Amino acid sequence: MPVAVPDTVLQIDGGILLFIQSNLRSPFLTQFFKAVSNYGVIVLAVYFVIMLLWEKRKIFPIASACVVSGLLGNFIKDYLKHLVKRPRPFLDFSALEPLIKRPKGYSFPSGHTTLAFAVAFIACRILPKRYSIPALLIAALVAFSRLYLGVHYPTDVLGAMCVGYVAALITEFLYKR
């Protein structure tokens, strides 16, 4: 049985998405956020490898922690999608026009955001702080791209950030043992 989203939350979420659609969309930003959505996690991975090389750190253990965190986040995300069964926002709000092919499946939590934050939070735990801020900014751009493109609710993205954080904490715990 799907989890019911309170009407107030649904209306606030929908209002934010419709605001973005009406006030922030432009041809340039649409192309930018499509690219961020498609390649943001890859950019994050490349950034991460460059910073590890720059800091002369061993890449394999840290890269494997990123993979484990991402896989764990994906596992948790899949479980939550089937538990919550939240429809995509364009199904609840007919005025919302998605800017990419309509994704199938459930909306909560965002998979792109989960993966981006699972990796970014590992970066925060491993890399010097001056390198973790750009990682978090890239992850935040991925998260916002999902809102901008009209395929996730704000609470989907917030939930995904939490899932990414939990995945990173569990991964860190496992690697320290």
Image (spheres, grey):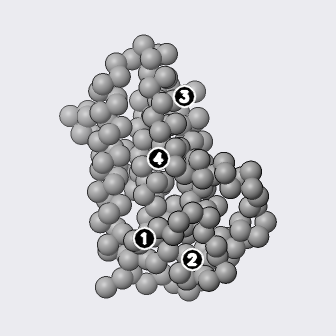
Q: Residues within 10 Å of mark 3 (few under 14, many from 20)?
A: some
- The x, y position of residue 131, in whole percent, is 54, 28
- The x, y position of residue 91, in whole percent, is 53, 81
Q: Is residue 1 above or below residue 121?
A: below
Q: Which residue is mark 4?
A: 116
Between the C-alphas of marks 4 and 2, the distance is: 23 Å
Decide: marks 1, 3 in contact (CB < 8 A)? no
Amino acid type, residue under disc 2 in the picture: Phe
Amino acid type, residue under disc 4 in the picture: Ala
Decide: marks 3, 2 in contact (CB < 8 A)? no
Between the C-alphas of marks 1 and 3, the distance is: 35 Å
Q: Which residue is mark 3?
A: 131
- The x, y position of residue 49, in whole percent, is 44, 26
Between the C-alphas of marks 1 and 4, the distance is: 20 Å
Q: Residue at x 54, y 51 (%)?
A: 37
Quadrant housing residue 100: bottom right
